[in-house]
Image (cartoon, rainbow, N blue to C red):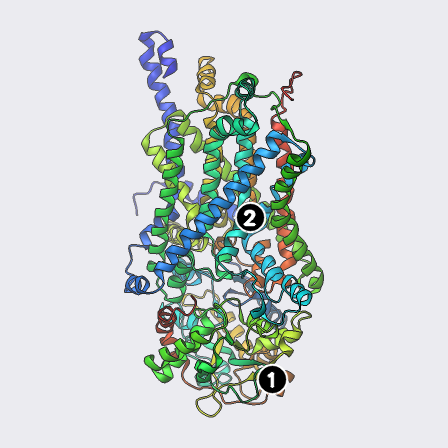
Amino acid sequence: MRSGCRRCRLVALLLVVWLMGLTGSRAVGAQEEVNVYSYRNPQLLEPLFAAFTAQSGIKINSVFISKGMLERLQSEAENSPADLIFTADIGRLTDMKAAGLTQPVDSEAISNNIPAQFRDPQGHWFGLTSRARIIVTAKDRVPVGAVTRYEDLADPKWRGAICTRSGKHPYMTALIASMIAHQGHEESRKWLMGLKRNLARKPQGNDRAQVKAISQGECDIAIINHYYMALMLSDPEQLAWANSVNVIFPNQSDRGTHMNVSGMALTRHAPHRDAAVRLMAFLASDEGQKRYVDDNGEYPVTPGIPWNDLQGSWGSFKQDTISLTAVADQRAAAIRLADEVRYDH
Amino acid sequence: MIMATLVSPTVGAAVKLRRLNRLNRWTVGAVFAALLVFIPIGSVLFLSLGDSGDVWPHLIGTALPEYVGTTLLLLLGVGVSVFLTGVTTAWLVTMCRFPGRRIFEWLLLFPLAIPAYVMAYAYTDLLEYAGPVQSSLRALFGWQSARDYFFPPVRSLGGAIMFMGLVLYPYVYLLARSAFLEQSVSVLEVSRVLGKGPWQTFKTVSFPAARPAIVVGVSLALMETLNDYGTVDFFAVYTLTAGLIDVWLGMGSLAGGAQIASSMLVFVILLIFLERMSRRHQKVYQQASSRFKTLPTYSLKGWPSALAFGLCALPVIAGFVVPVLVLGQLSIVYFDRSWTPEFKSYALNSLTLSAGAALVTLLVALFIAYARRLRGGRVLRVATRAASLGYAVPGAVLAVGILIPFAIFDNALDALMRDWFGVSSGLLLSGTVAAVTFAYVVRFLAVAVGQVESSLEKISPSVDMAARTLGFRAGQTLIRYHLPLIRAGLLTAVMVVFVDCMKELPATLLLRPFNFETLATYVYRFASDEMLGEAALGSLTIVAVGLLPVAFLSRMISRSRQLYPSPSTGDA
């Protein structure tokens, strides 16, 4: 590139400086900071970030992105400002790794606190909290013990009694994928077809909306993530919904309840690697884990962290320990299955 | 060219050449602007060339027929609904006098400020099985469960048509109203002299003259319907956009998603074609002489007056009053959970970003539309149409279409700067407010171009000829003569784009910088998890901030007709 005339270069430089001023583009600052792209709701993460900043003096810049985060990271490539990614589901974590957007982290502080089943074997991603996909039933209409397994939901005796959210939502996808991973494709198809036949209405709304429907008598049984119970119990208008249902941790006599994780990953080109790893370690520490339990009612991944009162009242339960990667591998198959049995239609 | 015939033949050639150059500058500039705006659409088309594996065989065997059928029904339903509501109300408030007309003139715009997905949330809260309406009905009639009675489901295709129609009719209303306002008094007077009543005058005079504007309004509403994801997702209505998001994010095939987006553009090209067909052989110019006379209106008495009142009140109540009451009630209950001191800065971000983007959009639209007026030509026509396609692409996909070229530019520039100066410029445009502003311009240019073009079209070329004869250049003619004449149209365009920017979510979410919230992204924090209660306060603020310019500009538009009030009005 020797040919570029000096004046052209000067003009180009001035133009860039001007543009940087105009767009408020951040020059590389000396202050220690960590940049976060998050799929998770900011109101969940902000208190944790504030606690970390108070302790370490490291500033956290975050942006909540839903659709297209992977594409943003991919196109920004080595100039991407992002250090850390947060997700609310295992699928997004494995997607990021598969796209080559993450890098391994080898830190004892982190891996000592997070058991092997909750992290990538190479350290590309780490689960931070786990959530159980539970069944809830109407207290006054479904006898205790009538439903104990996910498989029971396909029983024709529940015709017109079940409500769920869209079969293609990541939480449902992960459940169907875990079915496929355990039972194979054919068994899972039969199950999903049976479940579809038992639906009281076209799948709609989020997990809360299903409990609401039970409390209003529209259906008797629903599948939800466990922490929605805690969220509803603390809401002035939703308390009554939560109180109308019994909580069931399915498949206690065999493989255990299906679990998903929310997690984090270090980006491949993280510009503030050290500070980012400190934040990761903080979130995996006992203090970070305890906050997740108290603020959002999720289960800690670190063993020995005390549960909150609600979790305590439900007691301990058997968790499905199948590898999360094996479940994530069946995601595409699960979505196709939902299409094939026309689950949402 | 007109000029060339007027000057002597010897200097004529030289003058002609110079004029051509000058005119060409407009053309070249407009084509360049259009190309810039086309980049994101082009990159979506490029992405669709990628390999999508066996996504299509799977889709065709399963969900695709439903996606297409649902999309067509939704478009049809919304189209009919916005046409009837928009044209009826616009004609009533412009051409008739009845109690409340002056208030309805601007009240009818208010539903525009409510994001479609917020409308959907509010009405679901109100009308669903657990909502107050059905609960009271059950209590009243002693029904026990859903099996005892029939109530139309809210989360359905019908619901989507109804509520999208309610937020989208203002596009038609606005364009139709400014067309009715701009109509020629002399033609209306002729119609009256010939003994035609209000209905016949509407059918034979007002409607044909306003048709291009109405068609633009309806096609804008349809494009918005096509690109919507929030509402259809919430209502579990599976349109092509819903299928696209599923293929892209569920099946992990961006190429497959881009292919669906590209095939959706076929719908749009069809719409544009229909619009052009409707305008063929049709040139209606106003006679400037009586342009600023007060329109002759019909004074309504008795039941026609009550009917007119009812027809105008209905969309305002259903499209604004009811959802605002629902949101207001929820805001109070959930105030402590949703109020944050940063609210003001979010509102300020929304306001400045939207205002800036609206102005830029208007300037680009004006430039392109005027260049087309100066020198039509196929290249410019195709370029304009292509640039307007952004409105029909779902926001999240369009945002990816912006992300990629911006990052390529930034990374290339960074490499160049490192090479030349050894310093890194990093990402210059990606993840900045500039990228978000660009996204708004790309998305909403169609709105502004449609409005500006249909206003400019009404100005007789004799105005241009006269101005040019007087020695004014193209730019001077635009500023001195055209702008005052199309002021109402320009204000309408800037207002609609502003309100659209306030509501825009998916592109803002993906392209914004760190720690940057607008009201829409703040609402999304809660809305993404269907936490309507917590989202209510933010939604109300979007509506309130969006209403400020609506009210202000609406006054200006009404006044634009009274610039030079003439003493002898044709008022009946």
Identified at 63% across, 53% down, the residue is B323
Q: SS for tag 2? A: helix
Residue A36 to residue B324: above or below: below
Which sits in the foreground, B9 or B460?
Answer: B460
Q: Amino acid at mark 1?
A: Gln
Q: Residues within 10 Å of mark 1 (few under 14, many from 20)?
A: some
Q: Is residue B549 visible?
A: no
Residue bearing the label numbered 1:
A311
What residue is at 37 percent from the left and 9 percent from the top?
B7
- Residue designated by label 2: B167
Q: Nearer the viewer, residue B506 or B510?
A: B506
Q: Position of residue B35 (x, y in %)?
A: 37, 40
Looking at the rendering, which quadrant does residue B182 occupy?
Answer: top right
Q: Quadrant of the C terminus of chain B?
A: top right
Chain letter of mark 2 equals: B
Q: Residue at x 69, y 63 (%)?
A: B334
Residue B170 appears anywhere in the view:
yes
| Badge 2 amino acid | Val
Across and down, in percent, residue B488 comes to 56, 31
Above or below for A116 versus B503: below
Image spot of residue B530 (x, y percent) = 57, 64
On screen, residue B106 versus residue A7, left or right, reads right
Q: Residues within 10 Å of mark 2 (few under 14, many from 20)?
A: many
Q: Residue at x 57, y 68 (%)?
A: A58
